[in-house]
Image (tube, helix red, strand yellow):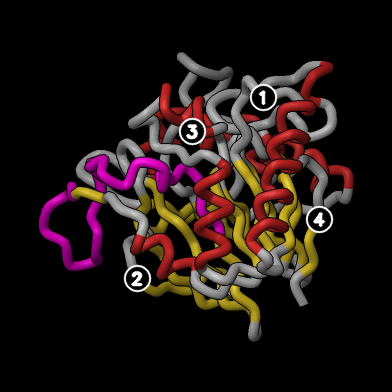
Amino acid sequence: MKIRFWGVRGSYPVPGAKTVKYGGNTSCTEVDLGNGHRIILDAGTGLIQFGKYLANLNQSFVGTILLSHYHWDHIQGIPFLNQIFDKNSKIKIRGYYGTEANPENVISKQIRKIYCPFEYKDLLAKFEFEPVTEGKTEVEGIKVETIFMNHPGGSISYKFFIGDKIFIYVTDNDISFPEINYFVEAYKKNDSKESGFISKGVEKVLNFIQGADLLIHDSMYLREEANNKKGYGHSCFEDTVDLALKAGVKKLVLFHHDPDHSDEDVDLILQKALEKIKKSSQKMDCLAAREGLEIQIN
């Protein structure tokens, strides 16, 4: 089983000379199950590159797209995925449900001629939609736990149990300002009668990531940047590293890079993160996510 990164930026894509090393596409991470099925974590512009990769292999897309939430940088690749016009592709899209927010509603309203050259009804792939709430579920035969995190409107994180390994994907999550109340426009549980609740704090995040073999986590800001963007629902890398160390994480991947950060900026963040880990006297591998990075999970 292989993790492959197709988009690692937050907010909006930033192609150009200053982002060649880490890439400029927005969030999209592939879990290649090795059996022809795939799990895609978020569908930013990195999804377009994933689709081209499959097309070059002459393969359809059979699998599940798990959406953390519906902000543009996590869904903007869907209308440009080659396989939506492939009748042999079978795509399940899962995301949280609220009064208006659900994956089918979001995607069908996104794919309209006012925004792109075709309508949702013109797509040839077979689509299925399924809700995600907080708790336990199964995705492509893998046991998964989910939890809502601290982000405007809400964001779901996913914990995968792969054999004796634990892989966790946490994007768009604020652990830098635990006092902020974030309103989540979703049903928290399957039996919830009303949409909407408050998410806040760090303790639930710490418990969720405890002992992870691999953690991908929002590390968008430097401390001073986070202070200037309080309430945006993202973390500074310093707090991400501290939390991962406290949770006993074995490998941390810094993710959701600020679009204003050049390759040199991300290099510096990674260098500071490694120095912080070294000073702690704890053992933890740390990488900065980049397009094309592959991580094997045995």
Inter-mark Cα distance, 4 to 1: 22 Å
The alpha-carbon separation of the residues under discs 3 and 4 comes to 32 Å
- Residue 156 percent coordinates (x, y): 41, 53
Q: Quadrant of the N terminus?
A: bottom right
Q: Residue sitting at 46 percent across and 57 percent down?
A: 157
Q: CA distance from mark 3 to mark 2?
A: 31 Å
Q: Are marks 4 and 2 in contact (CB under 8 Å)?
A: no
Earlier along the polypeptide chain: callout 2 or callout 1?
A: 2
Q: Amino acid at mark 1?
A: His
Q: Are the residues at dot 4 and dot 1 in contact (C-beta closer than 8 Å)?
A: no
Q: Is residue 163 left or right of residue 93?
A: right
The alpha-carbon separation of the residues under discs 4 and 2 comes to 28 Å
Which of these two is toward me, 271 or 54? 271
* Residue that label 3 marks: 120
Q: Earlier in the sequence, mark 4 or mark 1?
A: 1
Question: Which disc is residue 135 wearing?
Answer: 2
Q: Nearer the viewer, mark 2 or mark 1?
A: 1
Question: Does residue 294 appear left or right of residue 275 in this picture?
Answer: right
Q: Amino acid at mark 3?
A: Tyr
The magenta stretch spans which residues? Answer: 169-197
Residue beneath disc 4: 294
What secondary structure is marked by label 3? helix
User: In front: 2, or 75?
Assistant: 2
- Secondary structure mostly seen in the magenta stretch: loop
Tags 3 and 4 touching, CB below 8 Å: no
Marks 1 and 3: CB-CB under 8 Å? Answer: no
Position of residue 247 measured from the top left corner of the image (x, y, whole percent): 51, 68
What residue is disc 1 on?
261
Q: Nearer the viewer, mark 1 or mark 3?
A: 1
